[in-house]
Amino acid sequence: MDSVAVLSDVHGNLTAYRAVLEDIARRGISTVLNLGDVAGKGPRGSEAVALTRQRCQVTVRGNWDAFLDGPRDQLPEDVRWWHDELTAQDRAWLGALPGHHDLLISGRRVRLFHASSTDEFTRVHYHHSPEQFREMFRATPFTGDGPVPSVVGYGDIHDTYVEVEDGLTLFNAGSVGNPLDEPTAAYAILEGELGGADPAPFSLSFVRVPYDVEAEIAVARELGMAAADAYAIELRTAIYRGRHAELGLSVEGTDATAR
């Protein structure tokens, strides 16, 4: 069986990215597909872009990738740090990425995109409606008029899951660099006959990879990254920064190394 690694949402977390790519290499997997949001939120987006261009056969455009390529003066003040950390060439490459990627494996048509069949900005959460589920498989102006997929994979929400209904499989690859379900890097593996049009054995699995969270936080602080405290809490707890205040989470209270 052929193996394909599917990863997403690196977000400039080079420590986690290297750990995931090392795990992929140890498994002998040579095909790596990236579902976008390579940069932003983490401190080393430019290095993550360089590593992505080196190691990933296909990368699709994420929402952060799209707006980091936009005019700096139109970005919110708190986002400009990540824009400036990238080179002009990095930003142009991110902005020119395709919106989706299709492949055939074991007779199944697989479609991969960052967030939804609508565009890279329309979010579909783990808890979604039956209509949202079906919409992920439909042909849209964003995905084009190609054959309807039976398997769809996406990123964006930083939360791994798989759902199978009426012969359709929807999965989320989770996040390498900013997971919000548990504080270990995540990616998915598809196994089957790559390019095979006839039905054959097929599998989908998820991998969780531990990495040195505190080393990544230290890099963010050394580089003077914006929102470093919120980033540190997210990496340590896998809790979205919008909930930190209501839960009473502080960077000091989540720092196990200081206890």
Image (cartoon, rainbow, N blue to C red):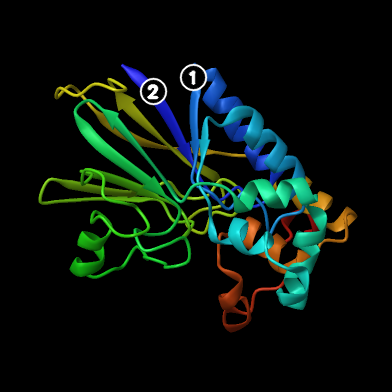
Residue at the spot x=24%, y=21% of the render?
Answer: 196
Q: Is residue 186 above or below residue 241?
A: above
* Residue farthest left in this picture: 166
Q: Is residue 57 above or below residue 162?
A: above
Where the C terminus falls, by quadrant?
bottom right
Residue at the spot x=21%, y=33% of the render?
Answer: 108
Q: Position of 248 compared to 5: left or right?
A: right
Q: In this view, does 27 lie above or below 240?
A: above
> Could you tell me if the residues under marks 2 and 1 are in contact, i.e. CB atoms within 8 Å?
yes
Residue at the spot x=10%, y=51% of the render?
Answer: 166
| Amino acid type at image mark 2 | Ser
Q: Residue 222: percent from the left, percent from the top?
A: 89, 54
Q: Position of 198 compared to 81: left or right?
A: left
- The mark that comes first in sequence, 2 or 1, is 2
For label 1, the residue is 27
Asked if residue 58 can be seen in this view, the reply is: yes
Local secondary structure at mark 2: strand
Q: Residue 118: percent from the left, percent from the top?
A: 36, 63
Asked if residue 254 can be seen in this view, the reply is: no
Mark 1 neighbour density, 10 Å: few (under 14) some (14–19) many (20 or more): few
For label 2, the residue is 3
Q: How far apart are marks 2 and 1 (CA)?
A: 9 Å
